[in-house]
Image (tube, rainbow, N blue to C red):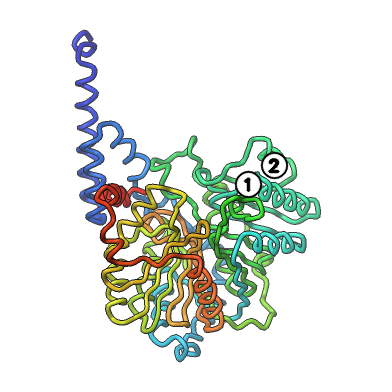
Amino acid sequence: MEFIKNHIWQIIIVLNYVLALSAVVTVLFKRLNPTKTLSYIIVLLVFPFVGLLVYYLFGQEYRKSKIFSRKNVLNQSIVKRIQQELELDTKTINKVDDLLDEKSKLIRLLYNNEKSKLTVDNEVNLIKDGDEKFKLLLDDIKKAEHHIHLEYFIIKDDKIGTLIIDALCDKVKEGVVVRIVIDDVGSSITSKMKKKIKDCGIEMYSFMPVLFSKFTGQMNYRDHRKIIVIDGKIGYVGGINISDNYVNANNNRYWRDTHIRIVGEAVKPLQILFFTTWDFASDGEIKISKDYFPSYNGKGKMPVQIAASGPDTDWSNIMEAIFVAITNAEECIYITTPYFIPNDEIITALQVAARSNVEVKLIVPKKSDSWVAEYATNSYIEQLLEAGVEVYQYTKGFVHSKTMVVDDVFASVGTANMDYRSFNINFEVNALMYNKDFCTQLTELFNADLKDSEKLDYQKWKNRSKGTKTVEAIARLAAPLL
């Protein structure tokens, strides 16, 4: 005991490096991206204790693990029947081949990956900011008759959050079932509001609670999705969380974001996604009935495919869809993202597209809400400019949209950023639209954002200070851990 007392710090350091070396071996055998592997090794070996903490919080891998099983939902007879009914729509791929040309590869890719069906009977409204979304949403909530399901990364009980929660409580009094899944890291709801939610009859669960989690990697595998399903008929998906930050009337800084409202068959895949998350978060059984999947009797004919990815999927579906869209582009690629921290595959695809005379334009914020993410994003810009990609920095406020348009026939709106975390770690969902009119609308919105952006010049950007480049290089090294 005297020896331990006199050498306590040496013993702790040795123990740290024993654990660190064990973690290094584990990382090496995970077949991760080399840059990400090197980042973890450096952090583990160079920063005692801190390195282990970072690895504990961010380094665990659970893709394909049983803890994220979806079988409890997907094996239910009603869900199987809905999947079979949607299967019929997949056979209509030939009808849209003339429009999509090689882009039809996307449909087959997502179907082969996750049995993600193409639905053709849909109406889709493009929403350009939180003010517009919340106005539509509150109106839809008031008209709900059977159920309202929300799955959100961020819900706060500020002005807009309280307004929506009050509206949901009113619907419960009318006999409407309301279920909410919130991410425990992203959301911020006071104990008083949680009590109100419970007392009024809303069922709410936190996704992987941080303080009481049974798992390691507590900061990983967050539920970054923003899904609303109302009566199985109306669906919302996109980048807008429930917070005053997204309401420009309540915000000093202009917030540009994009969301969509879907009415039609594409709501059914969103409903199934919600149920799989609910099953995991509630850790209980739910009997799913046909009432959650009503038939669509409208006249909408927009082809929509829901792409979801996360630790419960075998493949990085959204990243692969983006990659295929870029590599098959012939005329133009327009991308808006708040965080551009891509993998090598996406960088190379964009460079090759630009050097093949495809018009490639990228909008990112000039001033991010995270300085590390801002410098990490900036570290990738020079190599894009050198290849001929046009890069714009949004200056009107903060652009949080996650959108993409390719050749006026393919568009993506969803929750996934162009970064490691969205591609490989978090639960994300994007809606893919194969429709010229919708692409035209999204392109017009993109061009409007260009007017509020500064176009970067390659030579000027290349000549930025060494100090700035050094900070960017350090942020880029940390990028795989962000």
Q: Is residue 77 visible?
A: no
Closest to the observer, 373 or 289: 373
**Is 378 left or right of 122, judged from the image as shown?**
left
Task: Specify few, some or many for label 1: CA neighbours under 10 Å numbering under 14, 14-19, or 20 or more.
Answer: many
Position above or below: 380 against 442: above
Give x and y (percent) for residue 181: 58, 50
Q: Is residue 391 visible?
A: yes
Kindly identify the amino acid type of the residue bearing the numbered disc 1.
Met
Q: Mark 1 = which residue? A: 204
Q: Is residue 230 left or right of residue 227?
A: right
Residue located 39% across and 80% down the image? 105
The residue closer to the viewer here, 254 or 202, is: 254
| 135, above or below 304, in the image | above
Kind of residue sitting beneath label 2: Lys
Question: Of helix, strand and loop, which one carries label 2?
Answer: helix
Instruction: Please give the name of the residue rendered at 65% of the width and 60% of the height, measured from the top-left corner.
Output: 131
Is residue 383 or residue 410 the one in the foreground?
Answer: 383
Q: Are marks 2 and 1 in contact (CB under 8 Å)?
A: yes
Residue 326 is marked as none
Residue that numbered label 2 is attached to: 198
Residue furthest top in the image: 2
The structure residue drawn at horizontal position 68% and vertical position 35%, both measured from the top left corner, is: 192
Residue positioned 66% across, 68% down in the render: 234
User: In front here: 143 or 75?
Assistant: 143
Please say if 346 is above or below 149.
below
List x then y, in percent, for residue 61. Answer: 34, 49
Whole-number angstrom distance, CA of label 2 to CA of label 1:
8 Å
Q: Looking at the image, how many numbered discs can be counted on the residues?
A: 2
Tell which residue pokes out farthest to the right in this image.
Answer: 174
Crowding at mark 2 (Cα within 10 Å: few <14, some 14-19, many 20+): few
